[in-house]
Amino acid sequence: MQTSQPSAHRPKDHSLLEAYAVQNMASNDEMLAPDGTIKPVWAPFFEHLCGLSPEELGLRFSRGDQYLRDAGVLFRQYDETLSTEREWPLSHIPVIIGDDEWQIISKGLIERADLLEYVLRDFYGDNSLVTSGQLPAKLLSQNPAWLRPMVGAGKQGTHLLNTLSFEIGRGPDGKWWVISDLIEAPSTVGFAVENRIAMGRVFPNFFAGANIHRLAGYFQGFQQRLMDIKGRSSGEVALLSPGPMNQNYAEHSYMARYLGLLLVEGEDLIVQDGKAMVRTVAGLKPISLLWNRLPSSMFDPLELDSESMLGAAGLVEAIRSGALKTVNMVGAGVLETRALMAFLPKISSARLGRKLALPNIATWWCGQDSQRDHVISNYAQMMVGDAFSTVPLMSDPHTTVMGEMADGSHDQHLADLLKSNGHNLVGQEAVTLSTTPVWHDGHLVPRPMCIRISMGRTEDGWAVMPGGYARISAGDDAKALAMQRGGKVADVWVTSRTQVKTPSLLSTSKSTVTRSLTHALLPSRAADNLFWLGRYVERSEQNMRLFRAYFARICDGADHSDIIPAFIRDHLMDGVEPNAAAIAVRFGEPLGLALQSASRISDRFSPDGMMALRGLVMDAKALEGQQVPLEDAPVQISRLLRQVTGFAGLVHENMYRSDGWRFLSIGTSLERAANMCDLLSACLSAEPSSGALDLALEIGDSVVTHRTRFQIAASVSSVTDLLALDPNNPRAVRYHITRCKAHIANLPSQHHDHHMSHVARQILLLETQLATGAPADISPEVLTQVKQDIWAVSDTLNSYHLA
């Protein structure tokens, strides 16, 4: 159905508009026309915004922020000593661009992408740009981003670039300029999707009815492109990430889930016989295509940066041999070099016979006399920085903005610096960016912004994602766009005059390959983290039960030195100090370690599970730091226990019964069985009259079961039978050994003969011992040996599947 865009006008309730316009009189603004009226493309949204009260807007903004927290979308804030996770700084007002203007932008970016493909192939091929004099030789020979081992690695007939991003800004004249080319590992696509989902929570009614282009169609095409590059190879398609300490790991994890890719880190990979392989619980499996999100120099410590701990040795040779393909050529980051921007206009004229439709910010390399002299003559309008850096000049805190230096004595210093070190420096025009509205303290304020746009190849050529995300300055300074400097991000809406398609990634691709999820590839690193996640959560629960039992007795009038409190501390809690804070650490630390393990496998862990675990960790930390009244301690810990058991139920009942679920369950069962051996061994060694047997039933959550089954007071025989040998009690040692045996039997085998694996033999012998034993056979010494056998199973499992 055809709909017409409204003409520029002033809305009925224009109090928001008047305050905004007064602040924005000297700027080129995305929302306001020069005469102060709302641009037609913004008018419907602004009308909707004016119809919402400040209170309702606050609730809606909170809804979007809550989604991002629940989804684990965070950014990592760095300082000189450490890095911390901070909330994603979403600006809740979108940037809106009309479809007609977007098509012009897209056409210009496609032209630029094709030119960059040509330049990259030349850099690692014939090098005609240097030999013909279009590019100084120093820009390659002295450029750390140009990787000599990759020369000749680009195969003819294949594309070296299949995805890239650009950062663009609108200048005072209303024209768009490319601020930076983002080739190697830009954070764009995943965060754009998360921003879009969050904004759908903020303005659900408006978004559903507006003709805003959806993003899923772009990912359908890119997903198909990955399959096309992979071809008929039987290997996996994987996304190579630096890991959870990288500021973009949340995006890597999200994109791996969204596109159905295997998320790997350097430690997961090994090159064997010239082929890239991933270490999995089923042994080494081939990788055919890597979407590399590492800096290229870190890709292969054997041929590139020898100090890299992020890549894997031999990957470059696997590329040369043709056994491994990458989405973008390793070494493509050379295209991000600042100095290259000074020569792209000349290269474009020679290659295309015309200027680029979407030029970059005017840039001058100071290694040439004429360009250096221009920078010196126009220093007041210049930014100056490292010529070989790949960080956008506007985003680099080390950039010198000459116009901000009021002291004229800098003139001669600048001239001397550029003449002595000009080949290492570039000058770039200091631009004034357009502004966009941001909600701040209850009203709209204008802030400088730029837009990051992603492109990907499809079978029909380049496709530009119809949207992206905007980076918005923390204040009036156009250089303060980075989140590290307080900047925000906003969703970019591309609106159409006609009804838009609403595609979904749930649509079946023509190359969809059906395979068993039960034995889908599970990297050993991921299995190891799942295994330890199960162990840490179970360890925390056990210590919570000990904590509750201890303080329940103190609240009933017992002294810290009485028999059972002293017994718990000395025999079950390693002699911990008799105070709430010290004992609370015993379950707080394992929960923190559990969260670390879960964070390393966020592509395999549900957002609900992660949210529940984060909540647990926060509540446990809060309890550690509180002065809890003595009588409230058991109540507080009971609340945490309910959260732990709720988390365990959420994860175990909702997780697909894959190998990952099995390793999580094995970790839980081995930890619980070993803890029960410790508990029983200590309690059976104590005097029967001390109350230790009742304590074992209490901590083992089996008081009611014991009363139902035996209808007698706790005895050595009844407690041993219930907590050590009962196959139906989920707190018993035998129950969990039997459970482990079943899980281990269903793990993928690395051998294809009829022989039982060593770990399967170990768990079978242990289960047989417990199944054929009687309560009288179970002594503290036997329980100690069973515990050692349990850890022997763990060690063998680690060497067989997880190492």
Image (cartoon, rainbow, N blue to C red):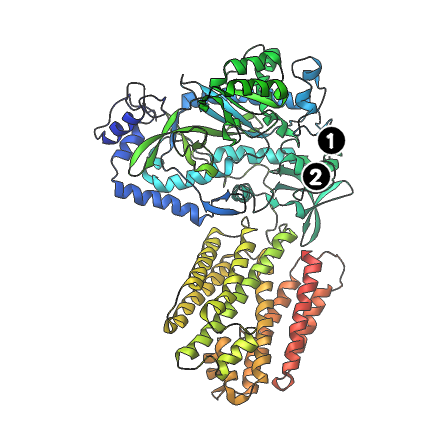
The answer to whether any part of residue 361 appears in the image is no
Residue 149's tag is 1
Question: Does dot 1 land on a helix, a strand or a loop?
Answer: helix
Query: Is 532 located above or below residue 52 in the figure?
Result: below
Residue 384 is drawn in which quadrant?
A: top right
For badge 2, the amino acid type reads Asp
The answer to whether any part of residue 457 appears in the image is yes
Residue 575 is drawn in which quadrant?
A: bottom right
For badge 1, the amino acid type reads Pro
From the viewer's perspective, tell me whether residue 746 is left or right of residue 92: right
Q: Position of residue 141 (x, y in %)?
A: 70, 24
Of callouts 1 and 2, the N-terminal one: 1
Quadrant that contains the C terminus: bottom right
Question: Does dot 2 land on a helix, a strand or a loop?
Answer: loop
Residue most toward the top? Answer: 353
- The local crowd at label 1, few if under 14, some if 14 to 19, many if 20 or more residues have their Cα within 10 Å, is some
Q: Position of residue 592 (x, y in %)?
A: 52, 58
Residue most toward the right? Answer: 273
Q: Residue at x 32, y 20 (%)?
A: 33
